[in-house]
Image: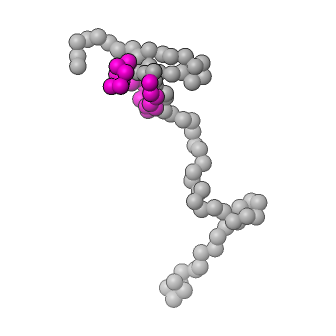
Amino acid sequence: MQEHGIARFQAKASEAGKPVNWRDMGKERHGQFTLSKWSCGCQNVRVGTREFCAQCLKCGNVFAKIDAEVHQVVACQTSQTGGV
């Protein structure tokens, strides 16, 4: 590397004087958790969409959104237009 004029890499120290752990760089949380929790009674799923209409293949129940702040079940609102 020296023969090509590239300087040797110098690791930076953190504010506390300890070496920076490069594996943890960029892993800071930048926002809130965006997946919402849905449950059918026998299992839970986390989904990134605002609406999720599905039926469990194990118990046959329809998944309902679980409101984490109030611990309340919110039913799925679907329109019955005759579509598939």
Whole-percent x, y for residue 3 in the image:
51, 89
Display colour scheme:
one colour
User: Toward the viewer: 27 or 57?
Assistant: 57
Q: Residue at x 54, y 21 (%)?
A: 67
User: Toward the viewer: 5 or 46?
Assistant: 46
User: Toward the viewer: 47 or 12?
Assistant: 47
Whole-percent x, y for residue 53 in the image:
36, 22
Whole-percent x, y for residue 51 in the image:
40, 23
Q: Quadrant of residue 59?
A: top left
Read off the magenta span.
42-62
Q: Is residue 38 above or below residue 79?
A: below
Decide if residue 79 is on the left or right side of residue 51: left
Q: Residue at x 35, y 25 (%)?
A: 58
Q: Residue at x 50, y 16 (%)?
A: 73
Q: Please tell me whether the stretch drawn in magenta is mainly helix, strand or loop.
A: loop
Q: Quadrant of residue 48?
A: top left
Q: Locate the C terminus and report the quarter of the image it occupies.
A: top left
Decide if residue 67 is on the left or right side of residue 80: right
Q: Residue 55 magenta-drawn?
A: yes
Q: Residue at x 74, y 59 (%)?
A: 15
Q: Is residue 5 above or below residue 34?
A: below
Q: How many marks?
A: 0
Residue 38 shows in the view:
yes
Q: Is residue 9 above or below residue 51?
A: below
Q: Residue 71 magenta-drawn?
A: no
Residue farthest bottom in this picture: 3
